[in-house]
Amino acid sequence: MLAFNHSASNWPTFSLLGIPGLEAAHIWISIPFCLLYTLALAGNALLLILVRAEQNLHAPQFYFLAVLALTDLGLSLSTLPSVLAIFWFDVRRIGLDACLSQMFFIHTLSSVESGILVAMAFYRLVAVCAPLNYTRILTRHTVAWLSGAALIRGATLLAPLPFVLRAFPFCGATGLSHSYCYYPDVLNLACGDVSVSSAYGLAFVLCTFAVDAVFILASYVKILGTLLKLGPPGRTWKALHTCACHLCTVCVFYLPLLSLAVLHRYTHHTSPVLYSTMSDAYLLVTPLLNPLVYSLKSQQIQAALRKRFGVQRVVAGE
């Protein structure tokens, strides 16, 4: 993905950023990064294997979890080559086409993950508010349809952006402020009038992440209202506890995403170290923590892990 030769064309090459001011320590910084990437890849791959292999995980909530793990694998693999190439070999240059391809996959997969989180909120909404219709509404076909819709939405809305950016001339500085290609970052380096592209990027964010966040919030407001009518607080708390995995995943995904978006749009003199840290948290911490959260909170997954690794121990209530 890196260090492409564009000498035969006028296309630019961009310079990716590692950890500014700590270039001499990049080889040491790469050790925890490599470890975290390995854990993220292994954790999500293990979840995929468990959902496929264990019969008791063949249920809608775990199918959604498998799609989420597959999306997180894609996000990790989209950034892994450029990040480790910087830390290991000090290779910072990336060609225009490679940069736009990486940008497309990062933003598309982020949109897909947001859509899957909405689908998981819908699953919980049906399970709590319409339990008698649960098996009729939430079928394998429904899971496949919702997952496919999230993918089509992200890919369709993102498809024009690489072509639009490719048509812009790039002059002056070509240094990016992340270890990978991020759309607002690349757009800032383009020459000419980029107002239409900037507006489209903002519209994309509003039509995907903002709408998804509103739907998730509305779903949990409805869920909470239904639970409060069910009976004593103990029963309500027990029901809410089953939603804890999803709520943790939503927070892990949206907080770094929103923080990075705010930094790009509303701050102009922020430390490059902060930019770099937030961008790494955005695309590294989420794939790392998602399988950990579900492994710790889901009793079914804990049971599948014990069975898979031969630990003969049964926890009461599982």
Image (cartoon, rainbow, N blue to C red):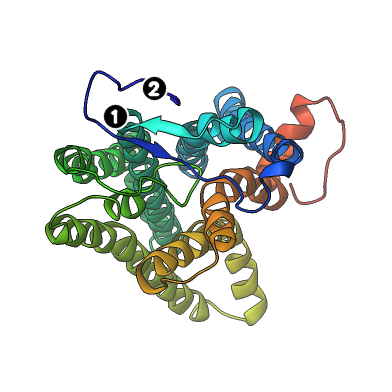
Q: In this view, does 72 lie to the left or right of 24?
A: left
Amino acid beneath label 1: Asp
Task: Please tell me how crowded label 2 is: few (under 14), some (14-19), or many (20+) other residues with Cα within 10 Å.
Answer: few
Image location (x, y in percent) of residue 191: 19, 51
Image location (x, y in percent) of residue 173: 35, 49
Image location (x, y in percent) of residue 87: 64, 35
Q: Nearer the viewer, mark 1 or mark 2?
A: 2
Task: Please tell me how crowded label 1 is: few (under 14), some (14-19), or many (20+) other residues with Cα within 10 Å.
Answer: some
Image height of 10 relative to 138, above or below: above
Amino acid beneath label 2: Phe
Q: Is residue 109 left or right of residue 196?
A: right
Q: Residue 97 carries which label?
A: 1
Nearest the eye: 81 or 151: 81
Snapshot quadrant of residue 219: bottom left
Q: CA separation, marks 1 and 2?
A: 9 Å
Residue 290 seen by the camera = yes
Q: Which mark is residue 4?
A: 2
Image location (x, y in percent) of residue 239: 59, 66
